[in-house]
Image (cartoon, rainbow, N blue to C red):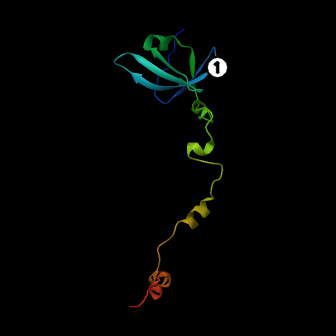
Amino acid sequence: MSNRLPPIVGNWYSHRDKGEMFQVVALDEDSGTVEIQGFEGDLDELDFDEWVQLHVDAAEPPEDSSGALGDMEPDELGYTDLQLAPDAAESLAPGPLTWEEILEDDDLDELPLH
């Protein structure tokens, strides 16, 4: 039985016999190869004939796609579990100031007179 799923860069697949997940990360039509990366980060290159012989199913991306990144801390990925509520983020962004607020914040009265 042959694989009827096309290799699509960015799509995840699961080996039917092994249950292991991998993602297609590159296609080279000139050389006829498919580069895949397993969840743990291992890279492999298959030719199109090998791809057709694989027993795979389409799979949803894993919830935690950082498996290939090893032992990185969450803050190294650019996010942490400290998330702001949507209204809190708005209060951090300064809105436009009125001319009265600008004058109140102005420190002209603290300038030395010569």
Observer-nearest of 83 and 73: 73
Residue most extreme to the left: 30
Q: Left or right of 103: which side holds 79?
A: right
Residue displayed at 41% across by 91% down: 113
Q: How many marks?
A: 1
Residue 6, can we see it?
A: no
Q: Percent position (x, y) of residue 27?
A: 41, 23
Observer-nearest of 3 and 65: 65
Badge 1 is on which residue?
19
Q: Would you place residue 106 above or below residue 56 in this image?
A: below
Q: Percent position (x, y) of residue 40?
A: 60, 26
Q: Percent position (x, y) of residue 45?
A: 47, 17
Observer-nearest of 38 and 72: 72
Quarter-wise, where is residue 68 in the image? top right
Q: Quadrant of the N terminus?
A: top right
Residue displayed at 63% across by 59% down: 85
Residue 51, can we see it?
A: yes
